[in-house]
Each structure stands twice: as structure tokens, then as C-alpha cells.
Image (cartoon, rainbow, N blue to C red):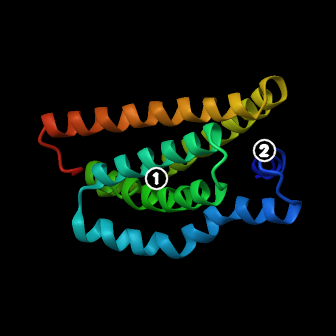
């Protein structure tokens, strides 16, 4: 939140109000798009492929923010779309592999791990920003998303090799 706002003010010389607006566009896009992407995923299946697209789009967004001075509205809008798609494709996969009587526990663990990750990443992001600056912070985010992309490719290959139903 705050890191993004200051990033847009420093790198792109946005006013405080404009920086807040661009920082919130991810969530503004995500609200109406999530149900639409959910419908798309439900109609097409191919959850892993949609997750792959979402993670790849997230990677492109962070690369644009890190290495270009293109209008950041482009990257942030793409980020909004990719977050929406990711949630709609990723979370339902749990129901494909976890027995129904354990779904609450599985989703609870997912939420717990997600929140732990968000907390740890926020702490690391602050430390990186304070010591190395915004460019290295974006490189850190790019590295994290690249690991995610690798994990999705591995998930795809394992699911395919085992004849799984995630796709």
C-alpha cells in the first residue's frame, strides 16, 4: 500500500492523490473482474493454464514497473486483471484434490500461509527498500514471481504426468 504510493510519487513524480489512485486501481479492477473471470474459469476449466497466464501477466507488470518509464497505469491495470484471474483459477483447484470433509481445513491452511507470506514479504520489502531502493525491491518482486511461475510449470507437468484433473 504505502510502499506503492511512495514509489509512484518518487519514480513517476505523481501527486499524492494520483499515486493513491493508481495504487488502488488493482483492487478497483479486481472487484468487478473477479466474478467474470470466475465464470470464464468455470466454463473453460484449464485452471493451471489460467494460473500460468495470471502469474506471467504479474511478471510482465512488475518488469514494466521496474525497467520502464511507461505509464504505470498500464502495469497496474494488468496487475488488477492478473490478480483477479489468479484467485479465480487457483483457489478452486483445492476442491479438486482435497476430500470434501477436509476442505475447510485446507482453505484455512491456505489462508494462513497466504497471510504469513504477505507479512514476511512486507517486512522483507521494507528492509530491501530502506537499504537498496525501489529498483532492487522490484527485482525482488520479479524474483518471487519468477519462482511462482516455475512452481506453476512444475504443477502443470506433475498434474499431466499423473493424469490429474487440475487442467
**Rendered residue at 24%/71% (across/down):** 43
Q: Circle 1 sits on which residue?
A: 107
Classify 36 as above or below 159.
Answer: below
Report the residue that reaches farthest toward the front.
69
Q: How many marks?
A: 2
Classify 19 as above or below 142.
Answer: below
Residue 113 is drawn in which quadrant? top right
Q: Is residue 23 left or right of residue 130?
A: left
Q: Is residue 134 left or right of residue 70?
A: right
Q: CA distance from mark 2 to mark 1?
A: 38 Å
Q: Is residue 109 left or right of residue 68?
A: left
Classify 159 as above or below 24.
Answer: above
Residue 37 is drawn in which quadrant? bottom left
Foreground disc of the pair 2, 1: 2
Q: Earlier in the sequence, mark 2 or mark 1?
A: 2
Q: Circle 2 sits on which residue?
A: 11
x%, y% of residue 155? 29, 37
x%, y% of residue 51? 37, 50
x%, y% of residue 158? 22, 33
SS of the residue under disc 2: helix
Most foreground residue, 18 or 23: 18
Report the residue that reaches farthest toward the right.
16
Q: Which mark is residue 124?
A: none
SS of the residue under disc 1: helix
Q: Residues within 10 Å of mark 1 (few under 14, many from 20)?
A: some
**Rendered residue at 21%/51% (across/down):** 167
Amino acid at each position: 500500500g504505502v510502499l506503492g504510493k511512495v514509489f509512484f510519487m518518487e519514480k513517476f513524480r505523481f501527486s499524492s492523490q494520483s499515486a493513491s489512485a493508481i495504487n488502488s486501481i488493482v483492487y478497483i479492477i479486481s472487484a468487478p473482474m473477479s466474478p467474470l473471470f470466475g465464470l470464464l474459469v468455470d466454463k473453460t476449466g484449464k485452471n493451471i493454464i489460467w494460473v500460468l497466464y495470471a502469474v506471467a501477466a504479474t511478471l510482465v507488470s512488475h518488469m514494466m514497473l521496474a525497467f520502464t518509464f511507461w505509464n504505470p497505469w498500464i502495469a497496474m491495470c494488468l496487475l488488477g486483471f492478473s490478480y483477479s484471474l489468479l484467485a479465480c483459477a487457483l483457489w478452486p483447484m483445492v476442491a479438486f484434490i482435497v476430500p470434501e470433509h477436509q476442505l475447510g481445513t485446507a482453505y484455512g491452511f491456505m489462508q494462513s500461509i497466504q497471510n504469513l507470506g504477505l507479512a514476511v514479504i512486507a517486512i522483507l520489502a521494507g528492509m530491501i527498500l530502506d537499504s537498496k531502493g525501489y529498483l532492487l525491491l522490484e527485482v525482488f518482486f520479479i524474483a518471487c514471481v519468477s519462482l511462482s511461475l516455475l512452481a506453476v510449470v512444475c504443477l502443470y507437468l506433475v498434474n499431466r504426468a499423473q493424469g490429474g484433473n487440475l487442467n
